[in-house]
Amino acid sequence: MPTISEILMTMDYGPAPEDASIAHDWLARHGARFGHFIAGTLTSPHTTFATINPATSVELAQVSAGSAADVDAAVEAARAAQPKWAALSGHQRARHLYALARHVQQHARLLSVLETLDNGKPIRESRDIDIPLVIRHFYHHAGWAEVLADEFPAATPLGVCAQVIPWNFPLLMLAWKVAPALAAGNTVVLKPAEYTPLTALAFAQIAHEAGLPEGVLNIVTGDGETGALLTGHAGVDKVAFTGSTEVGRLIRKQIAGSGKALTLELGGKSPFIVFADADLDAAVEGVVDAIWFNGGQVCCAGSRLLVAEAVAPRFTALLKARLGKLVTGDPLDKSVDLGAIVHPVQLERITSLVDQGVAEGAVLTQGAAPEGCFFAPTLAENVDPASILATTEIFGPVATLTTFRTPADALVLANATNYGLAASIWSENISLALDMAAKVKAGVVWINATNLFDAAAGFGGMRESGFGREGGREGMVAYLAMPSPKAGKAETPPAACDPLPGDTAPGAKGGIDRTAKLYIAGKQTRPDSGYSYAVQGPKGAIGLAPLGNRKDIRNAVEAAHKAFGWGKATGHNRAQVLYYFAENLEARAEEFVARLTAMGLGKSARSEVDTAVQRAFWYAAQADKFDGHVHSTQANHVTLAMHEPMGVIAISCPDRSPLLGFVSLVLPAIATGNAVVVTPSQSHPLIACDLVQVMETSDIPAGVINIVTGPRDDLARVLADHDDVAAQWYFGTAQSCADVEARSAGNLKQTWVEVAGLRDFSSSAGYGKGFLHRATQVKNIWVPYGI
Ligand code: NAI
């Protein structure tokens, strides 16, 4: 007879399974066969494929593979519904979003169970995290619809949004995408992931029941092929995608030049940094939430543990003890920590990556997992920072552990990835934690916490983790159009830059006989090619401009990178420099009018110079005012939404309005702390060379503005291919707009391309906060507050 203490010591978890009948009944009511949800009705099923319960391998339902005709019908329905939806008052749209929130709340149990069946995630997570956050998103965005006209006075909806989502948080990703889109007055066609389509279909039905007008939300199921039909559809105005970086690149290329807006929320390999003074017990619990939450199938999972050498043995011992207690098993069991992996294909991917890691020398500590589509929680040590396990997004419950000595080492390791989605920092030293938060390349940073989400905070990445934010004020911006350019006439492309050897004067008759230089790293330099091109005035050549090439661009980008101190300067410092620039430009206004007149631009010269001066003062004023927000998110936290510069922005100026085009694009970029590489107007480059003199007398630090004259479109292509350029603004031909977007897929730089001539830079469309938004990315830093 065992003693009581022996019984207590040997007690195991008793199973506490959730009753799944609510979801099985729902499936049965639909005959376990589904069509799409188009124009307010479920269509008849066709060409179906199975969606399975990964925990049991049992088929749950047959779902239709969306064809081109289905996608056409859905986009048409969304298009037809959009004007009416956008014409509703914000208040009326808010009421619909409130209704969605309430109805989801009423069906919370069905949705939680269905999500767990289809995805394999523990019921504890779908019930306590996913579905409550879905509800929160609809409530929060109902609020945005209500106040939209006041908060974003000039903004308009984008139109029809194509949204493609992954399988790791099926309904939550739907909410992240649908709620802001609808709040802003857009209509939606959404494609859920092929492994997890069921909660999207249930949601569509709930939306119908809640009275959402037909066509406002459409769901088309299918795999990547259906996804590509949707994202590439000509009737779509905006594409929002969450998924792998690989598919993000494909979509970037697919829609290049189409004029569609794009936001991409892609992969990550996020650092989880434990400093020596961290609360180690809390940090261990943090790891559980960082990498074993949702089986590590989380884009922002803290998958790289970076631990201070001094505490690494203790931390590792605590972590291994905790790992050994995690329970992996039936996701419907309320006491389970890790459920099933979403699909055998994903299990195979995880297994193969881990096998490769072991072959490279990784030493594993693993918990227990049942047979089937499960993977045990895993800690991999002896992992080189360059090895496969430390660099590849595994999307499974696998953490690597690496030690560091100093905070500087930790930062190098943290940023040694092409991704930049999230970071988690553990330290009781607030100065150290916030210093690190400022320096780590990540769109979201959690201090002494991890994987916190809220509808009021923006979420999204930097670098190859994509661009755009979801949630909060910044998430709304992603579904609204900037004041649209006045529909001017597209510019005639500039004449080719015929190379002239050396810097021979062209023998201008009565013109300004000048030979300009490039401006790189604060110095006027000759072009690498040794060639120049003749710049034409009304009566023939008026000077020579250097013919910049690939090498000059490389030098300019390097110089821009070295000017990183500009991004760290205070807004006040930048404002002072820009005021100085504005004053110097104003003082030389007559000279600039004369220059423009000599170039044959006399008619608009005066107003162009006056407006350029106004812009310079305006951006000087904004330099210390375009700051971020403090989001009100979860209890005991504040979320600082910081506007950070992109880094190096490449700018190709329009040909017309050579002074105003240059100033209107360069100033917002540098006011927010970026360094720029600019190709000025190809036909009238000399005005930029004149501006160099103003810059040199205005204390603009070397490397902040670099100017490479020459063939705009060739140089833009070089810039688009350059991996050290974070963002690119191109104003030129339609063909090169497409080229720049397609080539930007390499490092997934953010692009802003427009056919030159359409935007009237002399009007209100030529400046404003929209430009400042383009020049910055928001980093959301979650800080403990008032605990
Ligand atoms: P995926 O990126 O292929 O799928 C995501 C969504 O995109 C799905 O709805 C899919 O049908 C759709 N899709 C696929 N190809 C498309 C195309 N050419 N055009 C338009 N839509 C397309 O991700 P997958 O294959 O499910 O997972 C592969 C790996 O991607 C995972 O192992 C993981 O590493 C990563 N991943 C990352 C996610 C994230 O949130 N960062 C989410 C899902 C996967």
Image (tube, rainbow, N blue to C red):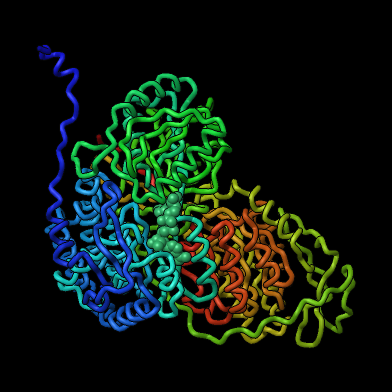
Task: Indicate the quadrant of ligand 1 in the picture.
Answer: bottom left
| Residue depicted at 37% across the width and 41% down the height | 446
The foreground one among 194 and 623 is 194
Horizontal and vertical percent position of residue 5: 14, 13
| Residue depicted at 36% across the width and 34% down the height | 287
Horizontal and vertical percent position of residue 427: 40, 29
Number of labels in the image equals 0
Horizontal and vertical percent position of residue 617: 53, 64
The foreground one among 260 and 298 is 298
Do we see residue 778 in this rendering?
Answer: no
Q: Quadrant of residue 212?
A: bottom left
From the image, which quarter does the C terminus lie in?
top left
Q: Quadrant of residue 143?
A: bottom left
The foreground one among 757 and 211 is 211
From the image, which quarter does the N terminus lie in?
top left
Horizontal and vertical percent position of residue 97: 20, 66
**In the image, residue 28 above or below residue 509:** above
